[in-house]
Image: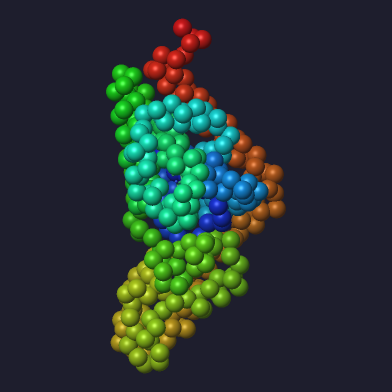
Amino acid sequence: MKKKIVLTGDRPTGPLHLGHYVGSLSNRLVLQSSHQQYIMIADMQALTDHADRPEEIRRNILAVALDYLSVGLDFDQSTVFIQSMIPELYELTLYYLNLVTWNRLKHNPTVKLEIRQKGFKEEVPAGFMIYPISQAADITAFKAEIVPVGDDQLPMIEQTAEIVRKFNRLYQCDVLIEPVAMTPEIARLPGIDGGAKMGKTLNNAIFLSDSPEEVQKKVMRMYTDPNHLHVNDPGQVEGNPVFTYLDVFDPDTEKVQEMKEHYQKGGLGDVVVKKHLLTILEKFLSPVRDRRRKYAENSREIWEMLFEGTKKASLQAKTTLKEVKEAMHIDYLQR
Ligand code: TRP
């Protein structure tokens, strides 16, 4: 049986952290053997709001690829590629732009939110405004059937589905495949400050590339229950990120349950819980570091692996573009 096609993408704007692992990378590790998996490093999309910092994007392409390798993604099983190196994606974007109204774009909830978050005000780059269309090109070029994304990206998948339906109807074909979104079981990992979301710019992240010393420092200064002043005070487990992390990373659920009860009753100190969490996190991070070490010295090799993946991805994008132009009757040379 043919494996289903799945595609995900990351903007290379910084190193990946535990939140990325829980929400996305762990899922990709599962999918890489059961599905035909494409993983795109979306450098073009990163440029839509980082046009002044191409060097940073270049560095982060390598950092993100190294993060992939360090968690165990296999570049032979998954096709990992660089978005900007596939010009077919730009061409598809321009054709799709004519199928979407300006008004529809302006009302994309994710775009609206990001415009506010990024403080663009009236100075929104046009490239940024149309990134949902470019994302539709990413997804359809590879005929992705499943697109695992966080909640915030659901409007993008909806936009893509609309374009697919419109294209197939308008040009009376079934060239484009309508994708289905897949959202993660664990919506998001809180930051070490107890904030709802872990993020690089929020300064509350534990990175996959952090050293044992950095991880220790971060765990020891993690937010807990602010009212748990003395060991014997009863403590709160809900909204306490130390316990949320244990729920996610400690396979011994019985022990976690016992610790929670003890903490709620009083008599279990934050430092003891944090030390346990540190042991658990290190069990996860130590093999990640070992794999990282294997590749870190050889960035040339990583670039080569990315170019290999890009070559493979490019073949599929070319095929889709050819079909798209045929369906539109603009394949002039072939006629
Ligand atoms: N917009 C996505 C993000 O910010 C990244 C992305 C680009 C993407 N192209 C994609 C995700 C295609 C899924 C499919 O995380």
Answer above or below: position of 233 versus 41.
below
Answer above or below: position of 128 versus 308.
below
Quarter of the figure that contains the N terminus: top left
Residue 108 or residue 192, whichever sits in front: 108
> Horizontal and vertical percent for residue 179?
34, 37
Residue closest to the far front: 122
The quadrant in which residue 268 appears is bottom left
> Horizontal and vertical percent for residue 239?
34, 73
Protein image colouring: rainbow
Task: Determine the residue positioned at 46% across, 71% down.
Answer: 192
Residue closest to the far top: 335
Task: Determine the residue positioned at 42% across, 63% down.
Answer: 197
Count of numbered tags: 0
Task: Determine the residue positioned at 51% across, 10% down.
Answer: 333
Q: Where ligand 1 lies, by image quadrant?
A: top left
Residue 283 or residue 40, whichever sits in front: 40
Is residue 261 in view from this perspective?
yes
